[in-house]
Image (tube, rainbow, N blue to C red):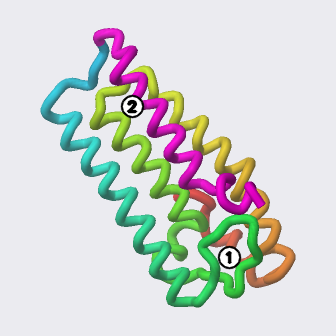
Amino acid sequence: MIRQYLDIPPVWLLICLALAWAQKTYFPMGLSFGSGIAGFVGGVLAGGGVLLMLLAAWEMRRHKTTLMPHRYADALVTTGIYSRSRNPIYLGDALFLAGMIVFWGAVLSLPLIPIFVWWIERHFIAEEEGFLREKFRAEFARYAEKTRRWL
């Protein structure tokens, strides 16, 4: 029961964001990315991440399938943003995290980005792709062959 509500990617994203914010607030160590350009680059990355998430969610809803991890999908979505990336929502999460780290100037939090990506791959993507392989067999194999996991 707790897994259904707490073990979802947005919770892990919020944990990483909280750690980055705490680092920039309480342990800045005098490091930053600079003032002007960092805000712009961070905003573009974070905004791009949100846009990816919204496009992916819209495509999933259009195909009437679940957005929730740990559940079987009703459809294999290969159109729209999913024709470019098999995991655009997770890519959007990673871009949003990167953008906020840059925007906040949380230099010491940069390692959270690859850690987040690694955790998402191991904890969510592997299971979800297993579900898709099981349910959509040849169709998923063709899709996975032509579409990269991230970009």
Q: Earlier in the sequence, mark 1 or mark 2?
A: 2
Instruction: Give coordinates of residue 99: x percent, y percent.
Output: 35, 43
Q: Is residue 95 left or right of residue 7?
A: left
**Which residue is found at the position 26% from the left and 25% from the top?**
33
Q: Quadrant of residue 102?
A: top left
Q: Amino acid at mark 2?
A: Trp
Work out which residue is located at the far top of the displayed protein and give it. Answer: 29
Residue appearing at x 49%, y 82% in the figure = 59
Q: Which mark is residue 7?
A: none
63 displayed left or right of 51: right
Secondary structure at numbered mark 2? helix
Specify the amino acid type for callout 1.
Tyr
> Which residue is labeled 1 in the image?
143
Magenta span contains residue 57: no
**Are the two marked residues, 1 and 2, in contact with CB atoms closer than 8 angstroms?**
no
Q: Is residue 26 magenta?
A: yes
Image coords of residue 119 (percent x, y): 67, 43
Q: Identify whether 77 is placed above or below 20.
A: below
Considering the whole magenta stretch, tell me its main secondary structure: helix
Q: Which residues are magenta?
A: 1-30
Query: What x and y, as percent, mark residue 21?
Result: 39, 31
Residue plotted at (48% across, 48% down): 94
Displayed quadrant of residue 150: bottom right
**Which residue appears farthest toward the front when viewing the image?**
1
Res. 21 mark: 2
Sort mark 2 into few (<14), some (14-19) or many (20+) by Cα contacts within 10 Å.
Answer: some
Task: Mark 1: give few (<14), some (14-19) or many (20+) Cα within 10 Å.
Answer: some
